Image (cartoon, coloured by chain):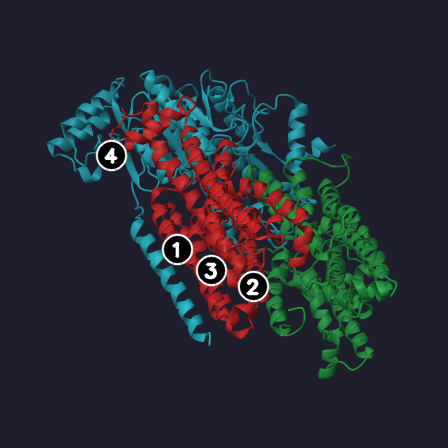
Amino acid sequence: MSTKVIAIAVVAVVVVAGAGVGVYFLLNNNKGGSSDVVMPDLQICGNANLDKTIDNYDLQIIMDIINGDKSFKDYPLADANGDGEVNNDDRLLVDNIIERKEGTTIYVYCLNTSGDMVSVPVSYPLNNVIPFGTNVVEPSLYAGGGPHTVAYFGKSNYPICESSMVDKIGVTVLGDPAKSAGRAISDDAWKDLMDLDASLKAADKKIGAFLLDYSGREALTETFQNDLKSAGIPVLSFASADAISEIRAVLTLSFLYGTTEEALGLNYANTSWKVLEKINSTLSGLKDDDKKTYIAFTMGIYVCQNDSTFNTTGAEAKGLPYYKTNSTFKAAYEGTSSAKMESTEALSNYDDADFMFSNRSIDYGKLTPAAVKKEVKGTWDKKTGDNKYSDFFKNLDNYHNLVYVNNLLPGAVKIAYMAYSMYGADYVELNFAWAESVLQEFIDGGYAPFSGQTVTSTMPIITYAMYEAASA
Amino acid sequence: MKDTAEPSTKEDVVLQYHRLILRKLMLLVASIAIIVLIVGLFSVSVFDSITLVESYEVIWNHILGNSYEPRTTMWWADRYIWNTAIPRTFAAIIAGVSLAVCGTLMQAVMNNPLADPYSTGISSGACLGAVSAIVVGAMFSATAGEFSLITNAFIGALIPAILVIILSERIRMTPATLILIGTALSYFFNSMITYLMVTTDADTLKSAYLWQIGHLDKITWDNIPLMLIITIIGSIFIIAISNKLNIMSLGERSATSLGINVQSFRIICLSVMAIMTAAIISFTGIIGFVGLVAPHIVRLIIGSDNKYVVPISMTFGAMLLLLADYVSSLWSSMPVGVVMSIIGSPLFFALIVFQSKKTGAIY
Amino acid sequence: MTSPESELMKNGYIHSNHLKLLFIIILTVVALLCVLITLGFGVYDISLPDAIRTFFDHLLGNVGTDRTSIRNDHYVWDVRLPRAIGALLIGAGLAVAGAIMQNDFRNPLAEPYTMGISSGAFLGAVLFIVLEISIIPISGLDSTLINACICSLIPTVIIVTTAKFKKLTPTAMILTGVAIMFLFNSICQVILVSAPSETLADAYNWRVGTLSRIEWDSLPPMIIVDVIIISALWIISPKLDVMYSGDKPAQTMGVNPQRLRIVTLIMVSIMTAVLVGHTGTIGFIGLVGPHVARIFVGSKNKYLIPASAAFGAAFIIIADTIAKVSGVNGLPVGVISSMVGGPLFIWILIKQRKKTWM
């Protein structure tokens, strides 16, 4: 009786489903993809020789290309205005850039939301930026972007580190100021942005750029992107969760913010490269077998998977990601994000990992010993369910090598502290005093997030020794 | 209820009948009026600096093809109203209509006042589809993300429906069995969802969780056509069969004796409902309660003649969801699903408490 | 109306009460054996014989002093054994709770969470995990546990009080429970949507239900409620049987069904609250456990209660053993129990479709 009806019903459902999917697919035929491209230190078109600044060397290369002495193919960034060819316009533009002439349109060489490198025009000097995502807020502030920020999203989780932005007079909070923005941009926040732009327009100003952390790109939906495009607001996107990309982002942004900031940024980049060089030269003889292995963690009890950006940061400090030495671990933690530890047994088989680096964002400004102590204990013994964070580690042979690294620090400082943790005992060049001196150098460098801070108040790391001392 | 009490004389019958019709009309008119008013309020809620009149002016100018100077308040208002507010309002209306009418259909076909469009496990299927897109898709590019999410949810929603239809051949399919199978399927799908959720990282879990709750704020014009077409066709079908639904509510035996092939009828209704619901929730996430509460309230006011209940719960559902979405836009972007469940659960509670005699008797 | 019991007897599967007893004994033995077996499973690498040896070494007091022995002892005795015992307790408790609920409401879909206990417990947990609100703010107490226990009793209190003033049919009670559940869930949603993702993940994982948090300290309260309440229920099992035959027949036989229902509901709710507070809301066992037991021993509560307890204990400990070896580093047992429970449930439906309940 009903067999026929059932058959018809199933077929109908399937056909309609198929048609629906088909229609949707036709309506939304997206394309995407990326290719390997050159990566300059200073991500600005016209930086033909890919170094840290734009100067007469770049101009010379451009003139050589115009004269036919050099090939455009070898210097893709010689095309300063992003029009696909190198000609007199590029020469004039680079001239203006070298003069740091106000009002010049500079083409920034950065990611778009599909992951392609594109040239995005911004007006020099860059002003009234809106950053979205902790991993781009911090680089922008290290680059001196606080005073150049016109608005940010939601409640700041790190008001002291971000004070140059949060406490700036006239800065606008987009969305609910009592709520952290999280990973999405709310409708309310976007309405606030529209409102802000309209009021800037009335004052004959405009939003200089929307700064986007590439790993948070999904927050910028198509509607939002179209809005920005129609209003002529450029979007600059950086993959700055990675330490090396972070240095480039700081350098590029500081260049755009103006000459004072540019000096800061150059200093930042030079200090950072120097740290990396020091680690490289000190440990140049180190073979993979002699390297310390490490497992990276995030949010206390999440294991960073093999290709997570946190894992690459440890490798910059010449550690060996643990997955390279243990195939079981490698198979278990395939991926780019992180996986929660289900029970306190989770690490029991990976006892031979030398170090455990736990990334944690801790706001600066722990000015008194009591505040430091509280933070140390609070982090170490933070509860999750009936367990503490430390319960997951305390039965490991290398429990004393569990180190919390403050995620808000400049990439180079994180790397320095990791290098010290792993090799400080064997290499006097990388001892604690050195790591502290790196941090001190950055603090002395005059970067806004460090204003009024000391090497202890920034909470660079939390070690087992510190925990023991605090618990005593 | 009073209206169903036995009338004593002929005049009483006529009077009562007129009163009933009047009530129905009044409710219909009131619902539509409120809908229009809320549409207005919605558009106003763009900027503080724009008044009700100005926002209608913006809409009017857009229709006339006039445009504003870029980046002025009116220009932004125009963009917001046309690209966000109006699609969102449309989506709320379409979803409200669709979910409410599906709820009415389901309650009539299942002969169970607690049935809703999700009773056969559709929501959990859609959810599994979407969550797998969010969790596994997190590894792919951003552009693939949104597309795979919607299709995944759509296909996922239809899996339990197809399973129920196929299973209905093997099992003697009483409404109770159908709902039980739906429950069992949703348990199973939920366990898969849980598996995906507990093995992913915290941020992805949050996106997946938020998707589940139901939202309208990411709706764009591109999403509207599919929702609209399926809802229109489905609603017409349901209105056309509303007389048969009345017969179904008399019970299986009576329906059979009145010439309805109950089994086939149920399967057809389920298929229509599955497609309609899937088309909505794959864009909006699982918005609960509309399908459950809207038909109940309408029935409470106008009685249970499906000829009237079907169209009026459509408007009522639209209004309810629109209202919820308006509240959600005022309440620092609280997802509409949350607002709906806050409105819906006390209503549901009240229905049970005040109707406990009746419900106790029926269920 | 033929009870499943009599039908099965007709089919010749089980002839006498002795067979029922045998079934219970076998399940109990299986459950206890599983306690030993589960000691050998988990992320930590130790073979089953080694694990059992470690267990007996500890029992006899001769734990080795070398690093491996100490580590073995730690993982076997301090991590896995309490977890295994916890599995027994929770499985037994929830399955019995389910059996009583199904009996009270004469509804095959009733389970321990039917009255909204799970949503109450979750609300309590969320209050502490996200908002850090302790209902009893005494330091040293586990606030998540206390909150969950207390809040999970709220729906029961509401229903019982309502039933006191207004005559509620069993169905109306269930519906009220469902309504309270919706209400609580929407409050949880409001709190959770604005929570940071890390806390949301903690809350979500709490709800799924896991045994990984059980330590030696967690066991005493669980043992106390399990033992006292299950035995009390077993003692009054003849009355429960009478109630099952319907409210009117019960009254004629001198049992006040409404009062008995409320008393048993309160007992079951307290037991469930304590168990769920420790583990989160593990699903399915309360629903499926009694059904499976009923297939073998029929619906006489004298046998059904111990059989449900034994089956529940065995089921959860096996599910947890599977959970411990699944995924990257183990899964919450709630995932496994619902994956197994879903199909089992469908099977029960098909199997029982001719029965009166369907």
Residue type at mark 2: give it.
Leu
| Residue beneath disc 3 | B243
Q: Quadrant of the C terminus of chain A?
A: top right
Specify the colour of chain C. green
Q: Is residue B186 visible?
A: yes
Q: Are marks 3 and 4 on the same chain?
A: no
Residue type at mark 1: give it.
Ile
| Residue beneath disc 1 | B236
Q: Are marks 1 and 2 in contact (CB under 8 Å)?
A: no
Instruction: Please tell me how crowded label 2 is: few (under 14), some (14-19), or many (20+) other residues with Cα within 10 Å.
Output: few
Residue A325's x, y, as percent? 51, 53
Q: Is residue A273 above or below residue B120?
A: above
Q: Are marks 1 and 2 on the same chain?
A: yes
Residue type at mark 3: give it.
Asn
Which chain does tag 3 point to? B
Q: Secondary structure at mark 1?
A: helix
Which residue appears at 25% of the width and 18% of the height? Answer: A99
